[in-house]
Image (cartoon, grey):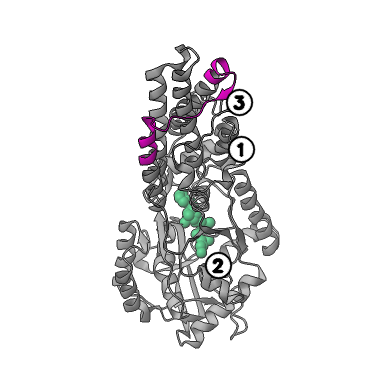
């Protein structure tokens, strides 16, 4: 079988999510990026790649300081509490991160200070005065042209504030040409294409130097060469991706993982990641990231979800109705990763019923019922020449291509084709009407083999359910020990093992329940 799905000759996969602000508790927008990163990490672990999945929380800045003041607690206390809420949400959603970074950790302070000291020593940081229009929610300055009606932030639609202070500046303007050169030499670095063009548009307009320190607040990483200044939250935050793999502490480890990283992020933070971050890395003498994948917004009623618009949906509420894997599947399958997607409860029920209850759930329950009735509960082996074998080979290739392209909806669509074909195969042969014997065994063995392969291929998306399928069809060990592509090869189901009939994997939901 062709070895699709390798990132590069080196079998390593480093994936990150943005680190989320602790002024807000996790909602389905945060979960969307995080579940996707998790599924990619799980896919690469299946491939046998040495995988590192980093997420965490962004705890400095004015926005967090003000959220803490509003709750009448110290900033660090507030950050600790909210950061814990993110960890709880990720535990609920079966997120298998390898490291959870908090920007208030000493290891991160050390890394930020070393990174920016390098930029300073290389002559890319200088002192100046900044006067500008600042959106606290974005933690960013805007020009008047960017504003809505000359006064409001284009993302948060609320008035910006006038701020004036002495700052350290990063000489971003000097990186216009190096960035253009980097984009040209790395046409796939920013995906999808439309987002790459957006970033290029920003660079081609010409870049201005940016202020990277503050004296007005103390809640941040101190500037090592100038007491009284802290780094502006974004310049501390972006460096988390370097801290996570040992920047400044373990050069060998850093060199192992960097720059072959896959950053996932929403389009709200494209400018920081696709323009500022590669420039900062160049300034520090490091290579820019291998891949930046920019996805769209999850919209609710056509609008971006946000605290200020009071339209947030929290993961636990949906998990209560759909289960963890119902939740994960929906967000991976429903929207093409990259585009905006409108979330609706009705749409979620309908996809859950069709793909999970009717297709996957039904396949397992039909097979287990007939095996119990007609084969004494012992699963027969598949045929080597089954008509489903070539379908399984195509499905593996398409599934691998989907994950490789960071297109989970495409990968799952491919995997579900095998489920649909197996259900059609059962309907054509009607094993529930057949007499026990070799003909019945052949039909059931093939269907059990499909379930085994689907359990492997769908496990990055719905890990708990797939482990359960694995157990019920009588496979030994756990799915985590499986390796692709071998585990997707036809003929791995041994036969002669006990098949368990259990409760429905995904009980059907009533529309509007
Ligand atoms: O921006 N649709 O943190 P943040 C899709 N701390 N994705 C969404 C979303 C939505 N409606 N809402 C949030 C920050 N997200 C900075 C990042 S990184 C060095 C610093 C996801 O808490 C999406 O990934 O505002 C978006 O980019 C991120 O959460 C913003 O999280």
Few, some or many C-alpha atoms within 10 Å of disc 2 (few <14, some 14-19, many ≥20)?
many
Name the residue rendered at 34%, 65% in the picture. 199
Q: Which of disc 2 and disc 1 is earlier in sequence?
A: 2
Q: Tell me the CA gap for discs 3 and 2.
A: 46 Å
Residue 222 percent across, percent down from the top left:
61, 78
Which of discs 3 and 2 lies nearer the camera? The answer is 3
Q: Nearer the viewer, residue 69 or 502?
A: 502
Name the residue rendered at 38%, 62% in the picture. 147
Residue 174 visible in the shown view: yes
Span highlighted in magenta in the image: 370-394
Name the residue tied to disc 3. 500
Name the residue tied to disc 2. 240
Q: Which of disc 2 and disc 3 is earlier in sequence?
A: 2
- The verdict on label 2 being within 8 Å of ligand 1 is yes
Q: Tell me the CA gap for discs 1 and 2.
A: 40 Å
Name the residue rendered at 53%, 53% in the picture. 45
Q: Is residue 386 magenta?
A: yes
Residue 94 percent across, percent down from the top left:
59, 45
Residue 55 percent across, percent down from the top left:
56, 58
């Amino acid at each position: 079988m062709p070895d699709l799905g390798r990132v590069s000759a080196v079998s390593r996969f480093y994936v990150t999510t943005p680190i989320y602000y602790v002024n807000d508790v996790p909602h389905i927008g945060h979960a969307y990026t995080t579940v996707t990163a998790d599924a990619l990490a799980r896919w690469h672990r299946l491939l046998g790649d040495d995988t590192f999945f980093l997420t965490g929380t962004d705890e400095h800045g004015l926005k967090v300081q003000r959220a803490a003041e509003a709750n009448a607690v110290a900033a660090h206390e507030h950050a600790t509490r909210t950061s814990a809420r993110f960890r709880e949400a990720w535990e609920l959603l079966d997120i298998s991160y390898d490291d959870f970074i908090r920007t208030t950790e000493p290891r991160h302070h050390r890394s930020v200070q070393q990174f920016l000291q390098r930029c300073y020593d290389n002559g890319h940081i200088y002192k100046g005065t900044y006067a500008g229009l600042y959106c606290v929610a974005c933690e960013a300055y805007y020009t008047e042209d960017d504003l809505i009606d000359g006064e409001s932030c284009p993302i948060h639609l609320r008035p910006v504030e006038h701020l004036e202070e002495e700052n350290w500046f990063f000489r971003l303007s000097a990186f216009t040409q190096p960035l253009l050169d980097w984009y040209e030499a790395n046409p796939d670095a920013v995906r999808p294409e439309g987002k790459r063009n957006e970033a290029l548009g920003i660079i081609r307009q010409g870049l201005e130097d940016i202020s990277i320190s503050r004296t007005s607040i103390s809640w941040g990483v101190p500037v090592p060469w100038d007491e009284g200044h802290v780094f502006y939250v974004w310049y501390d935050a972006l460096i988390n991706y370097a801290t996570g793999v040992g920047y400044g502490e373990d050069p060998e480890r850093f060199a192992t993982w960097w720059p072959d990283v896959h950053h996932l992020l929403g389009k709200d933070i494209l400018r920081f990641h696709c323009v500022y971050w590669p420039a900062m890395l160049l300034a520090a003498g490091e290579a820019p990231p291998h891949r930046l994948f920019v996805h769209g917004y999850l919209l609710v009623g056509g609008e971006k979800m946000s605290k200020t618009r009071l339209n947030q949906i929290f993961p636990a509420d949906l998990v209560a109705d759909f289960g963890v894997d119902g939740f994960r599947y929906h967000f991976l399958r429903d929207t093409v990763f990259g585009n905006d997607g409108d979330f609706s409860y009705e749409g979620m029920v309908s996809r859950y019923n069709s793909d999970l209850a009717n297709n996957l759930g039904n396949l397992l329950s039909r097979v287990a019922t007939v095996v119990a009735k007609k084969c004494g509960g012992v699963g027969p082996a598949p045929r080597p020449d089954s008509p489903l074998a070539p379908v399984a080979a195509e499905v593996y290739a398409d599934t691998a291509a989907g994950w490789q392209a960071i297109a989970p909806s495409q990968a799952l669509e491919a995997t579900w084709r095998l489920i649909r074909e197996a259900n059609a195969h059962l309907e054509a042969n009607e094993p529930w009407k057949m007499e026990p014997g070799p003909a019945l065994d052949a039909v059931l063995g093939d269907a059990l083999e499909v379930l085994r392969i689907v359990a492997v291929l769908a496990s990055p998306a719905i890990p708990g359910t797939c482990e359960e399928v694995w157990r019920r069809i009588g496979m030994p060990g756990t799915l985590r020990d499986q390796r692709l592509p071998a585990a997707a090869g036809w003929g791995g189901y041994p036969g002669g093992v006990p098949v368990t009939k259990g409760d429905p994997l995904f009980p059907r939901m009533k529309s509007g329940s």
